[in-house]
Image (cartoon, grey):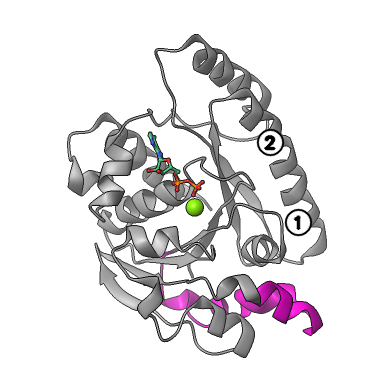
Amino acid sequence: MAKVITIFNQAGGVGKTSLTMNLGYQLGQRKKQKVLLIDMDPQASLTIFMGVDPTEQEATVKDAILDKKALPILSEIHGMDLVPANILLSAAEMQLSSVLRRELRLKQAIDKVTDRYSFILIDSPPSLGMLSTLSLVAANYVLVPSQTQFKSIQGTNLVLQTIADVRDAIDHKLELAGVVPTIYAKGTLQDREALGVLESQLSAITKVYSPLPRSTAFPDASQERLPLAVFSPKHPAVTILKQIAKDLEKLP
Ligand SMILES: Nc1ncnc2c1ncn2[C@@H]1O[C@H](COP(=O)(O)OP(=O)(O)O)[C@@H](O)[C@H]1O
Ligand SMILES: [Mg+2]
């Protein structure tokens, strides 16, 4: 049965989508691991980063959520499978408003494929609406990217509260898989102090991973529609991503 991990932070631009794709890639490179990525952001950055044109998709995650259709799975992109999204997903929120038990719709779609994967990673939208709720309710684990900036750290309290609220409302387990400090500029005092605060506040609650450095290789790799490890195999962030993947494999 797959471990379903939602990459969640209600803030935009903190590295959720980059982390989802790069971790998915690292997990997919490990022995016997089969990985599915699900794009739950109407802006479809994950779909685009994976080299898939959102506007050309006949079926997206929205059809599974709204019409209870099977998840439309695109196979074997950089060793991973992908359920794409596009802008039509933004209407799903409103269209779901009259649906009973709507928060279960993504979980129900995923339940039909969990036996085919070892990991299912869900990239969540930068908001606290219904699409985020669906993404969290569908998960067993939440991995939280947090930028090493003070405003981002304040945001992690809201992240943790949201996870706690969802956990109280569902009848399966939802655990924190850790916090990944992202876009870390080692050379700036601000980032070093913010990282220190992040570690001291959160390491009692969950694992705080080594920070992913700020580097143009991330946007450049995405621009080339490649995982970082393919775009720049010797990049130091690749070692950190590999370590996170290894730890995720050990989750119970
Ligand atoms: N470690 C990093 N260093 C520099 N830029 C990064 C890093 N991680 C992500 N980015 C860039 O920051 C922007 C936002 O990242 P993204 O993964 O789309 O975040 P989110 O999904 O949280 O909005 C993108 O342009 C991405 O390429
Ligand atoms: Mg994103």
Q: Residue at x 26, y 46 (%)?
A: 221
- Taking the view exactly as shown, the residue that stands out farthest to the top is 189
97, above or below 192, in the image = below
Would residue 162 appear left or right of 252 to someone viewing this image?
right
Location of residue 44 in the rendering, given as x and y in whole percent from the top left corner: 46, 63
Classify residue 11 by image quadrant: top right
**Pick the front one: 180 or 39:** 39
* Magenta highlight on residue 243: no
Contact (Cβ within 8 Å) of mark 1 with mark 2 = no
Residue at position x 42%, y 46% from top?
19
Marks 1 and 2 sit apart, C-alpha to C-alpha, by: 19 Å
Residue 75, position as x, y percentages in the image: 30, 76
**Which residues fall within the magenta stretch?**
92-119
Looking at the rendered structure, the kind of residue marked 1 is Arg
* Label number found at residue 167: 1
Is 69 positioned to the left or the right of 154 in the image? left
Q: Which mark is residue 227?
A: none
Q: Is residue 183 rendered to the left or right of residue 171?
A: left
The amino acid on which the numbered mark 2 sits, given as a three-letter code, is: Gly
Q: Residue at x 40, y 72 (%)?
A: 54
Q: Secondary structure at mark 1?
A: helix
- Which quarter is ligand 1 in? top left
Identify the mark nearer the N-term, 1 or 2.
2
Packing grade of label 2 (10 A; few <14, some 14-19, many >=20) is some
Q: Secondary structure at mark 2?
A: helix
Residue at 63%, 23% in the rendered image? 150
Where is residue 235 drawn, in percent x and y? 23, 33
Label 1 beta carbon within 8 A of ligand 1: no
Q: Is mark 2 within 8 Å of ligand 1?
A: no
Pick whichever, 140 or 144, lies toward us: 144
**Image quarter for residue 50?**
bottom left
Residue 155 is marked as 2
